[in-house]
Amino acid sequence: AANRTFTMIKPDGVENGHIGAILDQITASGFRIVAMKLTQMTTRDAEAFYAVHKERPFFGELVEFMTRGPIVAAILEKDNAVEDFRTLIGATNPEEAAEGTIRKKFATSIGENAVHGSDSDENAQIEGAFHFAGREQF
Ligand code: CMP
C-alpha cells in the first residue's frame, strides 16, 4: 500500500539552484507530492527537528547550516516510500552515494548533502507533522 515519507531540499540545494531538478527526479521516480512549501527553519526549529543528534560533534554546524536559508519541505507518497526514497537520495556522504542518486549529483559534502529523507515510517509521520498541518496534506 502507498505510504509516506518526508523530505527537505536543504539550504545548499536551494542556493545552488537545484529545486527544479531535484523535484523532477523525485516525481519521475514515482513519488506523489502530498504537501510542499518553501520555508526557513529557526534555530529553535532545527534544534527540535534534529534533537536525536544533539550529542553529536556536528550538531552546532548542522543547526547553523539548516537555518542559513530557505528549504523546500515536502511530504511524498509511494509504495514503500521511506526505503525507496532513501535509495533514490543515496548515502549521507556524497562520496559514498551511488551513481545517479540525488546526493551523488547535487550534494557537496557530508554536511551539505542537498536533501533529507526520513529513516522510518514513524519518523516520517513525526517530521511531516512538524512542518505541515493536516489541511495542508493532500
Ligand atoms: P541527514 O541524514 O538528512 O540528517 C542528519 C544530518 O546530519 C545529515 O543528513 C548530515 O547533513 C549531517 N551530518 C551527518 N554526519 C555529519 C558529519 N560527520 N559532519 C557534518 N554533518 C553531518
Image (tube, helix red, strand yellow):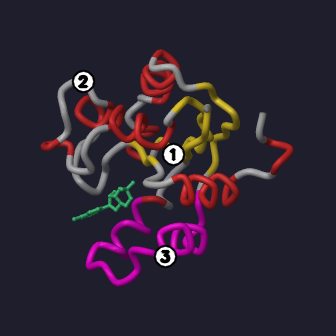
Q: Are the two marked residues, 3 and 2, in contact with CB atoms closer than 8 angstroms?
A: no
**Residue picked out by circle 2:** 100
- Mark nearest the camera among 2 and 1 is 2
Displayed quadrant of residue 61: bottom left
Q: Which residues are magenta?
A: 41-65
Q: Residue furthest top?
A: 28
Can you give x and y, in whole percent of width and height, for residue 18 in the image? 42, 29
- Residue designated by label 1: 8
What main secondary structure does the magenta stretch of the protein show? helix
Q: Are marks 2 and 1 in contact (CB under 8 Å)?
A: no
User: In the shown orientation, is residue 94 left or right of residue 114?
Assistant: left
Numbered tag placed on residue 137 in the rendering: none
The residue shown at (56%, 41%) is: 72
Q: Position of residue 68 (x, y in %)?
A: 47, 58
Q: Quadrant of the N terminus?
A: top right
Q: Nearer the viewer, residue 12 or 55?
A: 55
Amino acid of disc 1: Met
Q: CA distance from mark 3 to mark 2?
A: 31 Å
